[in-house]
Image: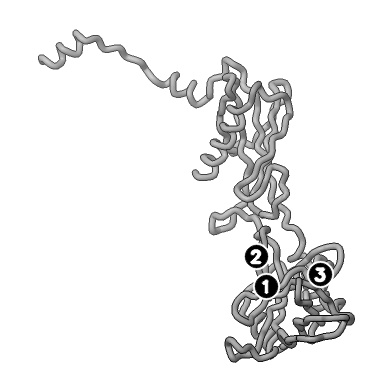
Amino acid sequence: MMRPLFLFFLLFSIAYASEQIFPAHIGSIFGTAGAGAGGSGRSREPKYNIEFHPLDSPFIPDDDQESITIPDKNGQRFICYLPKVEKEKSGKPVIQHNVSSMIVETEKRIKQKTPDELLEALKGPCFVRQEGWWSYEFCYQKKLRQLHLEDDKIVQGFVLGEYDPEATAAFNQNLSDISTLKDPRSKDASQRYHAHQYTNGTMCDLTNRPRETEVRFVCSEPRAMISSITEISTCKYALTVQCPMLCKHPLFQEEIPVWHTIDCNVLPKNYVDAKVRQENKNTDIVMVTDSENNDSELE
């Protein structure tokens, strides 16, 4: 019931807002929350394309296809046929596969490289980012350093962590989607990252514990580089590295929304719904006058 009701309000608002009757075969596009009309968002929520058909070329629906009759602001009526959405046994629309299942299926069929295998390309030269007083030097699977340079000489420095394969493996083992997470700092909710743990850095005076960093690898073109570093808590850091090679993995590619088409036929002005005609045909109208009603009460 919720889906037809939701689509009815969307259809009604679009039709009523129109300044004139929709021309033949005009297509209107809209989606659920989170994405613009242009479909630039990465949400996999269903999106709908509305096609309006003229009297001389109507859409032919299936026998069991749901329909809704709506008017536009000029009084022209349309009968709109709702798309069929495949459902699982649970009754929920089939929109996307479980992330873990998608990984397994993909790797089995085309022997897709894992994120770590793709990131092997980062080995070699270190990456440097300067932010004011400090420069940050990241060497893949080696260490991350915070440095202050004068005349290309290091005058002050801290190690923010050294690559810890055991901590990384333990961290990834606790994740249901194989270490692929949603970046909580990203404006795009579907932006994903693959994380490595860097531990045992320079001792922190404030916590009396070694500094540590979570290095987050994200899919981004056109070249590999450090995009940001933040201190998420005292002497604990998050370093984000843009990696074009990670974009080759399907989980880091743009999610394609599921599109459905709502087909609307123009109705003639004298159109009466078949159900209404049948109800009127089967109903006998009996007029009872006031005098007849009073007589029955006296009896």
Q: Assess whether mark 1 and mark 2 are in contact (beta carbons under 8 angstroms).
A: yes
Label for residue 260? Answer: none
Q: CA distance from mark 2 to mark 3?
A: 17 Å
| Amino acid type, callout 2 | Arg
Q: Secondary structure at mark 3?
A: strand
Q: How many marks?
A: 3
Residue 26 position by quadrant: top right
| Amino acid type, callout 3 | Cys
Label for residue 185? Answer: 2
The residue drawn where x is 57% and y is 15% is: 270
- Upstream in sequence: badge 2 or badge 1: 2
* Mark 1, residue position: 230
* Residues packed near mark 3 inside 10 Å, few (<14), some (14 to 19) or many (20 plus): many
Residue 165 is situated, as x and y percent measured from the top left of the image, at: 73, 88
Q: Is residue 169 visible?
A: no
Looking at the rendered image, the quarter that the C terminus falls into is: top left
Observer-nearest of 122 and 8: 122
Residue 76 is situated, as x and y percent measured from the top left of the image, at: 60, 20
Residue 82 is situated, as x and y percent measured from the top left of the image, at: 61, 39
- Upstream in sequence: badge 1 or badge 3: 1
The residue drawn where x is 63% and y is 88% is: 204
* Mark 2 or 3: the one toward you: 2
Q: Assess whether mark 3 and mark 1 are in contact (beta carbons under 8 angstroms).
A: no
Residue 108 position by quadrant: bottom right
